[in-house]
Amino acid sequence: MDGDGIQEILIHNDTGGCGGFGLFTTYVLKVEENDIRILFENFSEFDTGFESRFLDGYQMEIKNKITGYTLVYDVKEQYGEYIDGSSKMPSGKIMLDPFYVFEPKDTDDDGISEILCKQYTSYIGHADYTGTACCVLKFNNQTQAFEVINAWYEPNTEE
């Protein structure tokens, strides 16, 4: 993942959870001589850049502040119970869970693996699944950190 030709160790550990949503911890480790260095460690606080807000007219807006990605889609069928009849959506935003997918994948075909990440999103509680926030992390050798290089959102469009 860092381009040196030596494989890193990726750990994605389900540490519990309820309602079908797991709580995951994730690590990327690097073996250097007789030492192990942590390249990435996350217990859910890693900012993937996703922001959301409900718009009038039964719309939800999803943005990624890092990549500039934006999606606006209709949520009348999914959130009708929260709407007061005036097409005004409630205030607030969606919640992001820890990564439930955290897998190495060479997404840009440069011979170096990036990490494909997916997070469940919900509104009031996990029963209000809104969709999946997806992103790709790439290791930056200059900053010695993983950075979001691509992001998109897969909305739940089921009624």
Image: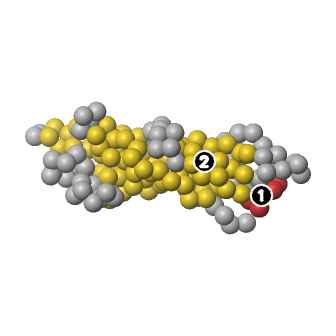
Q: Residue at horizontal 55%, vertical 55%? A: 153
Q: Is residue 32 left or right of residue 49?
A: left
- In the rendered structure, which amino acid carries the disc numbered 2? Ile
Question: Which mark sits nearer the N-terminus, 1 or 2?
Answer: 2
In three-dimensional space, the C-alpha distance between marks 1 and 2, rounded to whole angstroms, equals 16 Å
Q: Position of residue 53 (x, y in %)?
A: 67, 42
- In the rendered structure, which amino acid carries the disc numbered 1? Lys
Q: Which residue is mark 2?
A: 62
Q: Which residue is mark 1?
A: 76
Q: Tell me the quarter of the picture where residue 111 sits.
A: bottom left
Q: Residue at horizontal 73%, vertical 45%? A: 55
Looking at this view, name the residue that lies furthest to the left: 33
Badge 1 density bin: few <14, some 14–19, many ≥20, Cα 10 Å: some
Q: Along the line of sight, which residue is nearer the eye, 77 or 67?
A: 67
Q: In the picture shown, does residue 47 fall above or below 137?
A: above
Q: Position of residue 5 (x, y in %)?
A: 15, 52
* Element assignment for label 1: helix
Residue 27's tag is none
Q: Position of residue 16 (x, y in %)?
A: 50, 50
Badge 2 density bin: few <14, some 14–19, many ≥20, Cα 10 Å: many
Residue 17 visible in the current orientation: no
Q: Position of residue 45 (x, y in %)?
A: 48, 37
Q: In the picture shown, does residue 159 fall above or below 11?
A: below
Looking at this view, name the residue that lies furthest to the bottom: 158
Q: Along the line of sight, which residue is nearer the eye, 99 or 13?
A: 99
